[in-house]
C-alpha cells in the first residue's frame, strides 16, 4: 500500500520520570516524511495532589542539536498546558522527547506525601500532520 500524501494523527503517551536520563522518545519522524505538530497538550493526571514538572525537547538528529521547548515547567494537579505557542515542524529523522521530573522537597523523607517519582503522572497528547517528502 502506498504511503498517503498527508496523514493526520493523534498520539498519546504517559510520561515517565527520567531525571537521570535524556527522557522518553515520544515521536520520531519516519523516513520520507516531514511532520507538523498542530497541537501539544500536557495534562497532570497524577493520583497525588501535587504539581509535576515536565520537560519537552526537540532533537535534530542530523546536527545533534537538542533544543528544550519547555524545561521543568510545573503542571498543577488536574490542569493542562501546551508546550507550543504555535505549530512545530519536525523534519525527517528528527525527534521529540519528553519526561516528568521526580519531586524532592528539602527536609521531607522519601515516601512523604507529594515526594518521589512521577511515573505516569503526566500525559502528553500530540495532534500532527505527516506529509510525504517529494
Image (cartoon, helix red, strand yellow):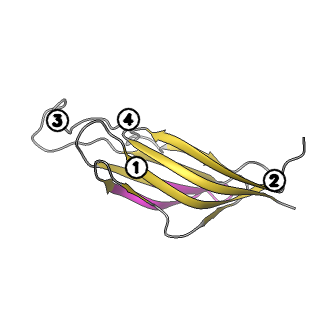
Q: Nearer the viewer, mark 2 or mark 1?
A: 1
Q: Residues within 10 Å of mark 4 (few under 14, many from 20)?
A: some
User: Residue at left 17%, top 35%?
Assistant: 113
Element assignment for label 4? loop
Residue at image mark 4: 119
The relative height of residue 14 versus residue 68 in the rendered view (above or below) is above
The foreground one among 130 and 19 is 130
Label 2 sits on residue:
32
Horizontal side of residue 63 vs 48, given as left or right: right
Q: Which residues are magenta?
A: 56-73
Contact flag, marks 2 and 3 (Cβ < 8 Å): no
- Mark 2 / mark 3, whichever is N-terminal: 2
Quarter of the figure with the C terminus: bottom right
Residue 104 in the image: state x and y as whole percent.
22, 42
* SS label for mark 2: loop
User: Cβ–Cβ below 8 Å for labels 2 and 1?
Assistant: no
Amino acid at each position: 500500500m502506498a504511503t498517503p500524501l498527508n496523514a493526520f494523527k493523534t498520539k498519546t503517551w504517559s510520561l515517565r520520570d527520567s531525571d537521570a536520563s535524556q527522557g522518553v522518545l515520544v515521536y520520531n519522524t519516519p523516513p520520507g516524511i516531514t511532520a507538523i505538530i498542530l497541537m501539544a497538550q500536557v495534562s497532570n493526571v497524577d493520583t497525588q495532589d501535587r504539581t509535576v514538572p515536565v520537560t519537552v525537547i526537540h532533537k535534530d538528529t542530523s546536527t545533534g542539536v537538542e533544543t528544550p521547548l519547555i524545561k521543568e515547567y510545573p503542571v498543577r494537579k488536574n490542569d493542562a498546558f501546551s508546550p507550543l505557542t504555535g505549530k512545530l515542524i519536525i523534519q525527517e529523522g528528527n525527534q521529540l522527547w519528553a519526561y516528568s521530573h521526580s519531586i524532592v522537597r528539602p527536609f521531607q523523607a522519601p515516601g512523604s506525601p507529594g515526594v518521589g517519582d512521577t511515573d505516569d503522572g503526566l500525559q502528553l497528547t500530540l495532534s500532527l500532520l505527516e506529509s510525504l517528502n517529494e
